[in-house]
Structures are given as structure tokens and as C-alpha cells.
Image (spheres, helix red, strand yellow):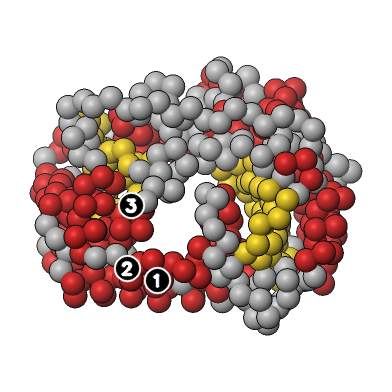
């Protein structure tokens, strides 16, 4: 590893006690390093009755650890010019540290301390529970959050790992106490089958030596998430009245493919054509630019390890949502049934490929690429070969992949907002 390495490539290494390690060089001339620890600790692992605990653990790990309370940890980071951040999904929880290259070793040790010895101080627990309760209220009372919540609950049945948003309930938050937080952390965060991604301009042997000295665990890996096969059902529409809001959120969505599916590159381009590519995509061009019906219009494929979901969405006024709903549905149908024109596909594809170099302007952005690919167990040269992969996709491949990735037989339409004012 050196600053002359290719940040579009990373190398897998065997870490201690089953820890998977991915090593990446930063962009040329970059003066910072990043490291991310990813554990099988998403909210799909929340024990019954303490829903929301994965989110709480994830937040609290970056608050205080080892000898450092919240203020002391913040001061250590400030003196180093570093940051700690966290993220979570149904499948995983992750913690990232970023800072100057010259202090990468003490920062990597600090990440290990945060991962292995979070404090879960009582005052921090109360603060995070308060924050999560406020988030629950926003999720229920604001159109965008409520639309997402109801869409997922309609697509996925009870017990499915992708059904919830991870925020829990008011009752479950009351049961999240330090003892249970420690139990969840010990069972999920320091278990085997975790991943550590390090992006730094330093000799590989030195990085590996530091990782072996600081990380590792004897805790068995938790069983993989069980995602049951979804049974077909008729399409449905959910209408949720939220008076006092000025905007109606419209969502159309259904189940989709995992990231490792062979159709994913073509499905990625199908989504970019439909609504994933800002300014160029069909939903934006038709619903917002041409017809002026929406504040936003886009689409997304959330492809995870065991499956995923797709969504086409827009935010509009109470007097326009019926037309927006119709146009969203028409465009989803068109991407599935009509072959994309060669010129349109080329413009979208080259825009997506052209965006890749922009992700190499900073260590943090390049690091995110490596984390994404390594988490999904993709080859170390995945991003280096991604342009070639996309250029091999033909227009008919896009249509055929869209028929699989945008499953519409059991789709759900969700309308949330002042819908009674029509």
C-alpha cells in the first residue's frame, strides 16, 4: 500500500479470529486516512421487545469508550483533527474513523477501543433514547418518514429482516437499558465475520500488524439473516391522512434483487434511467421539469445481501397527487416493457461512469466505495472494472433486468399527507 496505489482497487487480507480485512490506497496526494468496522449488528437482529436496540448501540458506540466519557472522547478527536461516525442498516452496523494520515495508528487504535469497549453511560443512554423517540414521532407524523415506514411494512411480512426502519417503538425504547445494550454489543459487534476496511498510505505489513494487535474476537458469528421467500399477493394501495402538512408523499414500490445478483449492473442502469440519475432521469424530466407536478421525483433500488426493494417516489401538492401517482406508475411500466433507446442509455451510462472519478477526490469518498464493495464480498477490482461492466450492458439487458428488479405483481402504492383535501 502506498499513495501511488489505485484507490479503485483494494486487497482482501485475513485478519485475526475470522475478521475480514480490506486494504485500500487513498487517492494520490491525499493527506487523510479512513477505517470502517462493519459488524453483523443491524436492526434485523433486534431481540423481540427491544426493537431499536441496534440503532441505540450504533449511536452510543461513538459517544464514549474505554477511559473516555463523551466530552473526553470529543476532545481527543478534536486534538487529532479526526471524526467518528456511525451508520446502520437492517443487516449491519458500522463505525468509521477519519483523520490525518500522520496519526493513523493512534486513530486505528481508537477505533478498536470504540468497537470493543463502548461505555453505555446512563446519561448517554437517556440522551439517545430521547433522540430516538423524537425520530419515531417524526417518522409517524411527517409524510416522507411515514411513507417509507408503511411501504416497507406492506412489501415485507411480519418477521422479515427488511420490514422495519429500525427505530423501534416507545415501549421498546423504555426496555433499552445499559445491561441489554452491553449484551447486544457483545453478541453482535465483537463477533466473528466482521469486516474492517482501512484506507491509508502506509506499508501493508505495518497496517496488518496493527490490526492483529487491536482487533479480533472469540465470540462466534451470529447466524445469517433469514429472509423468507415472499409470497405473491395482489397489488395494494395505502392512503394515510396526515392533516396539517402541505405536501403529499407518493411511493410505489416492491421487492427487488440482492446486490450480488447477476442482473444488478443492468438493473442499476435501469434505475438510473428511471429516476436515479439527477436531472437526466425520466421521473425528474417528466414529473418535475415537463409537467411541474412535484417538488422531487426519483427512484431507488435498495439491494442488500439477501434481497431488497425498489421505490419510485415523488412529493407533490394535495391537488396533484393523483396525476403524479399515475405518471410514476406509467414510467415504472415503461422501463419494464419498452427497450431503452441507445442514445438515452449511453447518456445515462456515461454520466454514471463519469461520476466515479469524482468519488476519488477525497479519502473519505474513495473509502466509501471500498466499504460498499467489501461488505458485499465483491472482487477487489470491482470499481476498476465497473465502467467496462456497465458498457457491456445492452438496451435489451436493461429491460430484462428491470422486469426482475422492479417486481410489480405485488407492488404497493402509498399516499401520505393531506389527501382528503382534493
Q: Nearer the viewer, residue 65 or 248?
A: 65
- Specify whether 367 is left or right of 35: left
Residue located 82% across and 64% down the image: 205
Residue located 20% across and 55% down the image: 399
Compute the Cα span from label 1 to label 3. 15 Å
Residue located 49% across and 76% down the image: 357
The answer to whether the residue labelled 1 contacts the one labelled 2, judged by CB atoms less than 8 Å apart, is yes
Residue located 28% across and 25% down the image: 231
Compute the Cα span from label 2 to label 3. 12 Å
Examine the rendered structure and indicate whether residue 35 appears above or below residue 137.
Answer: below
- Specify whether 353 is left or right of 97: left
Examine the rendered structure and indicate whether residue 294 appears above or below residue 173.
Answer: below
The residue under label 2 is: 392
As helix, strand or loop, the secondary structure at mark 1 comes to helix
Examine the rendered structure and indicate whether residue 226 appears above or below residue 148.
Answer: above
Find residue 64 and report its horizontal and vertical position in percent. Answer: 78, 43
As helix, strand or loop, the secondary structure at mark 2 comes to loop
The residue under label 3 is: 263
Examine the rendered structure and indicate whether residue 143 appears above or below residue 276.
Answer: above
Number of numbered discs on residues: 3
As helix, strand or loop, the secondary structure at mark 3 comes to loop
- Specify whether 337 is left or right of 162: left
The residue under label 1 is: 388
Sequence-earlier tag: 2 or 3: 3
Find residue 311 and report its horizontal and vertical position in percent. Answer: 29, 46
Find residue 333 and report its horizontal and vertical position in percent. Answer: 14, 49
Find residue 128 and report its horizontal and vertical position in percent. Answer: 64, 36
Residue 385 visible in the snapshot: yes
Residue 132 visible in the snapshot: no
Amino acid at each position: 500500500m502506498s499513495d501511488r496505489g489505485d484507490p479503485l482497487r483494494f486487497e482482501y487480507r485475513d485478519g485475526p479470529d475470522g475478521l475480514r480485512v480490506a486494504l485500500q490506497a487513498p487517492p494520490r496526494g491525499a493527506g487523510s486516512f479512513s477505517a470502517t468496522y462493519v459488524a453483523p449488528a443491524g436492526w434485523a437482529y433486534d431481540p423481540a421487545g427491544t426493537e431499536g436496540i441496534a440503532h441505540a448501540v450504533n449511536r452510543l458506540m461513538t459517544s464514549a469508550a474505554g477511559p473516555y466519557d463523551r466530552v473526553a472522547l470529543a476532545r481527543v478527536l478534536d486534538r487529532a483533527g479526526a471524526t467518528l461516525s456511525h451508520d446502520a442498516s437492517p443487516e449491519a452496523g458500522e463505525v468509521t474513523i477519519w483523520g490525518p494520515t500522520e496519526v493513523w495508528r493512534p486513530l486505528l487504535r481508537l477505533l478498536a477501543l470504540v468497537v470493543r469497549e463502548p461505555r453505555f453511560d446512563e446519561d448517554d443512554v437517556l440522551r439517545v433514547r430521547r433522540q430516538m423517540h423524537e425520530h419515531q414521532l417524526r417518522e409517524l407524523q411527517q409524510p416522507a418518514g411515514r411513507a417509507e415506514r408503511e411501504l416497507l411494512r406492506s412489501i415485507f411480512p411480519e418477521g422479515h429482516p427488511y420490514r422495519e426502519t429500525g427505530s423501534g417503538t416507545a415501549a421498546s425504547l423504555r426496555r433499552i437499558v445499559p445491561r441489554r445494550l452491553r449484551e447486544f454489543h457483545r453478541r453482535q459487534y465483537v463477533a466473528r465475520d466482521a469486516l474492517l476496511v482501512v484506507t491509508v498510505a502506509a506499508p501493508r505489513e505495518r497496517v496488518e500488524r496493527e490490526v492483529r494487535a487491536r482487533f479480533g474476537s472469540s465470540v462466534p458469528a451470529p447466524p445469517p439473516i433469514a429472509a423468507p421467500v415472499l409470497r405473491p399477493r395482489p397489488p395494494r394501495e395505502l392512503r394515510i391522512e396526515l392533516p396539517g402538512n402541505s405536501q403529499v408523499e407518493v411511493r410505489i414500490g416492491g421487492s427487488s434483487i440482492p446486490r450480488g445478483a447477476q442482473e444488478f449492473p443492468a438493473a442499476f442502469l435501469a434505475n438510473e434511467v428511471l429516476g436515479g440519475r439527477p436531472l437526466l432521469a425520466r421521473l425528474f424530466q417528466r414529473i418535475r421539469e415537463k409537467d411541474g407536478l412535484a417538488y422531487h421525483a426519483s427512484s431507488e433500488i435498495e439491494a442488500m445481501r439477501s434481497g431488497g426493494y425498489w421505490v419510485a417516489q415523488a412529493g407533490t401538492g394535495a391537488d396533484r397527487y393523483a396525476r403524479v401517482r399515475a405518471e410514476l406508475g406509467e414510467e415504472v411500466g415503461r422501463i419494464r416493457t419498452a427497450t431503452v433507446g441507445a442514445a438515452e442509455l449511453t447518456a445515462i451510462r456515461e454520466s454514471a461512469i463519469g461520476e466515479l472519478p469524482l468519488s476519488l477526490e477525497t479519502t473519505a469518498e474513495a473509502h466509501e466505495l471500498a466499504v460498499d464493495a467489501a461488505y458485499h464480498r465483491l472482487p477487489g477490482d470491482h470499481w476498476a472494472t465497473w465502467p467496462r461492466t456497465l458498457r457491456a450492458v445492452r438496451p435489451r439487458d436493461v429491460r430484462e433486468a428491470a422486469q426482475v428488479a422492479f417486481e410489480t405483481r405485488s407492488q404497493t402504492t402509498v399516499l401520505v399527507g393531506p389527501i382528503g383535501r382534493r
